[in-house]
Amino acid sequence: MSAPGLIAAEPPVAVFRREKNWGATTSLTILIAGLLGAGYAVTMPPFQFNDEHAHFARSYQISRGEFAGHPDPKIPSAILMSLLRYPEGFESRSAPRTSATDLFAGGGGESGPAEPIGNVRGLRFFSHGVLACQVYWTACYLPASAGIRIVRLLNMTPVAMLYAARLMNLLSFLAAVAVALMLAPNFRALITAVALMPMTLQQAVAVSADQMTIALSLVGFALILHAREHPVSRRYLAMVFVTVPLWALCKNSLWALPLLLLIPRTQFRDKRRRLIFLLAVTVVTITGTFAWRTITSDAFAQYAAADLSRGVDFYANARILANHPLAVFEDLVVFAGPGASIPGLIRQFVGTFGWDFHPLPLTFAYVELLLVVGCIERNPKPFTIGERTILFITFAAALIQVYAMLFVIDGAWQAGHYGFRAAGVQGRYLIPFCLAGFLPLRQNAITVPSRILAPAVLFASTLYALLSLVIIGGFFYP
């Protein structure tokens, strides 16, 4: 029986069963992603993902019930001492191996006195990174903090907490990939290629705010693509209503809102109800974003003050960007350093590793694979010109937002041009919205069904991820 106001609406579960969206290839994809992710989680030495010290400290705070970020964060001194054992990037290629003692001996050290994180001097980026993490939405760290909480109850060491956090991150990522593949079977090859990319797998297990941002992006894209192609129920639209604000709150991903326009009018009783839905989601998303900004205002003020002390004025940069946007963006793109140049962004998007962004081979070949898959994967309901425009605008808006936000918090005037003081825009920041860039490439002249293309992509992606894993292992453990 159809729900009032919807076309052929039925519970999503029934739709899934009828279309047999879960097949052997999907099961194999999840299994391989899990094994590869576990490989990256174990192979990367403790705290050797970028800024993992700071993200771990924030996850640890949340595991203790400190859900809202606040100024002057504190952590038990024993935890801080454990963090100091691992540098921000190894100076040599021989990483210390994790032993049973590192995991089980000595306990968590939580009984000791709490120490302000600002007092830590042994790590160059740690104090600044923790202040930045106080501003991120709590849900970005929930899987990692859950893993830390479990290990804390077992009185295991901080290193054990780190690996538990990585494992919980991996499990939540696998769940997101499974949902995405099930909801959007006509995009299975492209989703597989993005999910098994070395940088995606690294971010899937690293303790950082990127993990949940990528996971919710995969789910969000799949929810909207499914609603674009199939009749859905009110419950399904309610699920979209809830997911989009949660998605947008992850690292301020407000660029996701235009994607709602891909949900056709036929999913609603009339244009008025569609407009109400779109406005309601937008208002809730923006309100939630500003509410979180208000809750963490004190933490943000301390973060801004800390940056001002090292020569970065958030508010001055915001005024410069507002008054001279074209000049700023031209300098950031044309006069970018090696790491922030377009080739550098592509390498970091596909796969680098470690604090110094050590490159992996064949990154441009993998981008070519993504472009080909984006072009030829068959879609029974081709995108219209209007839909392609929406996707392109989403990708462009996300890219501009990333550059603008990074310039505000890290911008500087150097050698006669605007630039970044530190690493600036990194390729991994593009992963959450990259689907909006690949989807408009689809054409109808030469196409391959997902059921044929997905296994081939799975094979190629798996080989490349394995090669990258071997290279990373050889670097740290020669």
Image: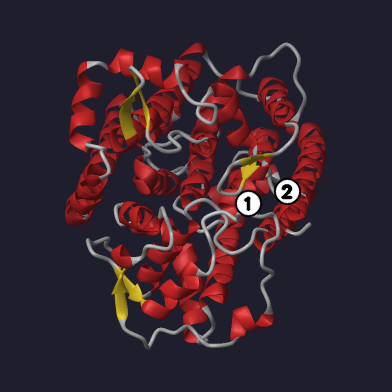
- 81 in relation to 299, above or below: below
Picture coordinates of residue 437, whole percent (x, y): 54, 24
Q: How many residues crowd around disc 1 within 10 Å: few (fewer than 14), some, or many (20 or more)?
A: some
Q: Quadrant of residue 345?
A: top right
Q: Residue at x 75, y 55 (%)?
A: 473
Q: Check whether the beta carbons of the residues at disc 1 and disc 2 lie within 8 A of each other.
A: yes
Tell how many labels.
Answer: 2
Element carrying mark 2: helix
Amino acid marked by disc 1: Ala
Picture coordinates of residue 164, whole percent (x, y): 57, 71
The foreground one among 216 and 230 is 216
Residue bearing the label numbered 2 = 26
Q: Residue at x 37, y 53 (%)?
A: 129
Q: Could you tell me which quadrant the C terminus lies in?
A: bottom right
The colour scheme is secondary structure
The foreground one among 219 and 19 is 219
- 51 in relation to 436, above or below: below
- In this orientation, does residue 274 appear? no
- In this orientation, does residue 310 appear? yes
Distance, label 1 to label 2, CA atoms, is 8 Å
Of the image marks 1 and 2, the number of the one nearer the N terminus: 2
Picture coordinates of residue 151, whole percent (x, y): 52, 79
Amino acid marked by disc 2: Thr
Q: Residue at x 73, y 27 (%)?
A: 369
Q: Residue at x 45, y 64 (%)?
A: 56
Q: Which mark, residue 281?
A: none
Element carrying mark 1: helix
Q: Quadrant of residue 447?
A: top right
Picture coordinates of residue 28, whole percent (x, y): 78, 52
Residue bearing the label numbered 1 = 178
